[in-house]
Image (cartoon, rainbow, N blue to C red):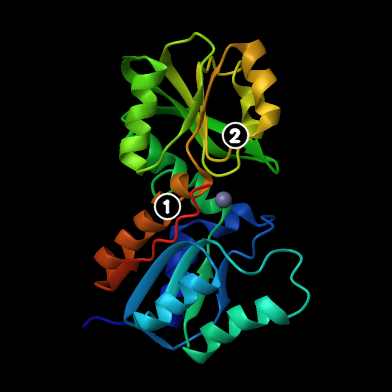
Amino acid sequence: MKEILLDKLVPFLDAELRLSDFSDDESANGLQIEGRATVRKAGLAVDACDYVFRKAAEKKIDFLLVHHGLIWGGLKTLRGMMGQRIKTLLDSEISLYACHLPLDWHPEYGNNAQLLKLLSVKKMGEFGRYHGRNISYWGRTSKEYSLDEFTARIDKVLNTRSAAIGFGRKVRTVGVVSGGGWFAINEAEKYGIDTFLTGEPSHSAYTLAEEMKVNLIFAGHYATETLGVKAAGKVLQKRFGLTVEFIDHPTGL
Ligand SMILES: [Zn+2]
């Protein structure tokens, strides 16, 4: 069984995932909780939560890489639920590593780049301005799809059930922002986007889409954000020979 020192793994991931490019992310990106000094098995998950931590402990995972970590700008106390979550990790000596916006944006491993790749949409440029930086991409499909055809493709590759709202356009130029990215619809006209794909449904997006005649697809926050951690996990497998396991805990939202 291959292993690596935590002290070696963390700087490698910090650099590979380009954490320093997003220094003002609300998420405390990087190693949030320090566990065992040696890593043999890595776990991947979308959300840091009790279910995932207990599974990780059961599966003897030493290092858990998540998209939504535990420590955000506002962490003030370690009481109640938060205390219990951290206790589960500390008791099992599991390290917690979070990578939020860098793992939306990353041109290779990011949720959005991976999603476009799975949908065979050719990446054309950056898109989705958030906190002063683009966190995503827009691109073109190789052929024209109806909204129903394109939505069916998304549901198949992400194993989800999207809500799609059409405003009469065919699908050719797609803007994507994983998770809760509805705000990026405001940039649709700028890039000539006919179809906007994000995770969480937002009522606010409807009338904007209606007036811009842009199709809306909401594929689920969870479903659109499983790809980044999986891609980062493949790097850990390849580079260090670590055993890697994805802990699935879908919210259906
Ligand atoms: Zn998210």
Residue displayed at 55% across by 44% down: 179
Crowd class of label 1 (few under 14; some 14 to 19; many from 20; radius 10 Å) = many
Q: Position of residue 218 (x, y in %)?
A: 52, 34
13 left or right, relative to 127: left
Crowd class of label 2 (few under 14; some 14 to 19; many from 20; radius 10 Å) = many
Q: Is residue 24 above or below residue 3?
A: above
> Can residue 5 be seen here?
no
Going by the numbered disc 2, the residue's amino acid type is Gly
N-terminal-most mark, 2 or 1: 2
The part of the image, by quadrant, that contains residue 127 is top right
Evaluate if marks 2 and 1 touch, with contact meaning CB atoms under 8 Å apart. Answer: no
Q: Position of residue 80 (x, y in %)?
A: 71, 80
Residue at disc 1, secondary structure? loop
Residue at disc 2, secondary structure? strand
Of 252 and 122, the residue lying toward us:
252
Q: How many marks?
A: 2
Q: Is mark 1 within 8 Å of ligand 1?
A: no
Residue displayed at 35% across by 83% down: 60
| Residue furthest top in the image | 168
Mark-to-mark CA distance, 2 and 1: 19 Å
Residue displayed at 51% across by 70% down: 97
Of 95 and 38, the residue lying toward us:
95
Q: Position of residue 221 (x, y in %)?
A: 53, 46
Going by the numbered disc 1, the residue's amino acid type is Thr
| Residue furthest left in the image | 1
> Can residue 105 be seen here?
yes
Q: Is residue 58 above or below residue 10?
A: below
The part of the image, by quadrant, that contains residue 122 is top left
Which residue matches tag 1? Answer: 226
The N terminus, quarter of image: bottom left
Q: Position of residue 15 (x, y in %)?
A: 47, 62
Which residue matches tag 2? Answer: 128
